[in-house]
Amino acid sequence: MEKGRRVVVSALQFACTDDVSTNVATAERLVRAAHEKGANIILIQELFEGYYFCQAQREDFFQRAKPYKGHPTILRMQKLAKELGVVIPVSFFEEANNAHYNAVAIIDADGTDLGLYRKSHIPDSPGYQEKFYFNPGDTGFKVFQTKFAKIGIAICWDQWFPEAARAMVLQGAEILFYPTAIGSEPQDEELDSRDHWRRVMQGHAGANLVPIVASNRIGKEVIERQHGKSEITFYGNSFIAGPTGEIVTAADDKEEAVLVAEFDLDKIKSKRHSWGIFRDRRPDLYKVLLTLDGNNPRL
């Protein structure tokens, strides 16, 4: 029997400072550590260049955005990816003329920039006021053919939407990656979403028979606002799930982590095809998904 197509994926987890050079250096150190563990595709958490600034609506925070082309962190990660021979999705705050996006550039193992995904679902809740900063993404859900696998990338709030996961897998994604920044809820100290957050993505893995990689930050971050401070404690719990939704490896809520897991993509492909979920789909019955209220779907 031929050897399967094996890929080692990694999720990183660390606490951010509000200094770009410090955070990029931390990301590079952990990418190198993941490479030492055999990782081929390495996921860094969402907006890792600084604090999660969306806790507050501040004009000065738009200065954190940079254009996609020539972005210094992306250029640095291109050199690193080429040096190590690894794939690195790079999350950043993108300025595009007068528009702004929560975006990810996908860097292949030879350092090539394969393109951009812009976050589609933009949250707006206490502590997570992203609609102030980000336009809704206009790329649609995409997949990227890397050296090691065809991958789908979506960002944080996107991970709560099964339509996004299904759209990527329908296009051939073999692994889904979710860079994330999520933690406590400033308006409700008793609300802890970590188990719900994880189970939703486990469901995406099981419903689509693909592995999922989720990278989240840790640590307490305090942002100054006009009417006092806002504080979020990010709960980490980064994880890698297998194609039936099983947790393969996971981090805790406090420690820096470099998670790795190996998957046989050919074996998973055979299981996905034989399970029948893509054979038995009925797209002709799903037009209601094109509506917001379930009424008058387009024919």
Image: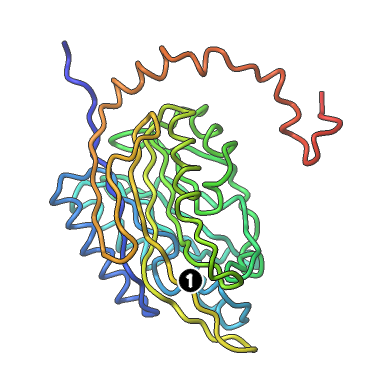
Identify residue type, mark 1. Tyr
Looking at the picture, tell me which residue is in the foreground, 149 or 289: 289
Q: Specify the color scheme.
A: rainbow
Residue 84 position, x and y percent, is 18, 51
Question: Above or below — where is 270 with respect to 216?
Answer: above
The 10 Å Cα crowd at callout 1, few under 14, some 14 to 19, many 20 or more, is many
Q: Mark 1 points at which residue?
A: 52
Question: Above or below — where is 129 with respect to 257?
Answer: below
Residue 97 position, x and y percent, is 62, 66
Question: Above or below — where is 186 with respect to 131?
Answer: below
Q: What element carries label 1?
A: loop
Question: Which residue is farthest right?
Answer: 296
Residue at x-position 45% and y-position 57%: 180
Q: Residue 45 vs residue 52: left or right?
A: left
Question: Which residue is farthest front?
Answer: 190
Question: Which residue is farthest left?
Answer: 36
Q: Residue 66 vs residue 73: left or right?
A: right
Q: In which quarter of the image is the C terminus?
A: top right
Residue 151 position, x and y percent, is 40, 37
**Quarter location, residue 70:** bottom left
Residue at x-position 52% and y-position 47%: 159
Q: How many labels does the image show?
A: 1
Residue at x-position 29% and y-position 36%: 147
Looking at the picture, tell me which residue is in the foreground, 156 or 90: 156
Looking at the picture, tell me which residue is in the foreground, 228 or 29: 228
Question: Above or below — where is 31 with respect to 60?
Answer: above
Looking at the picture, tell me which residue is in the foreground, 199 or 23: 199
Q: Quadrant of the N terminus?
A: top left
Residue 12 position, x and y percent, is 30, 56
Residue at x-position 51% and y-position 34%: 168
Q: Residue 81 vs residue 116: left or right?
A: left
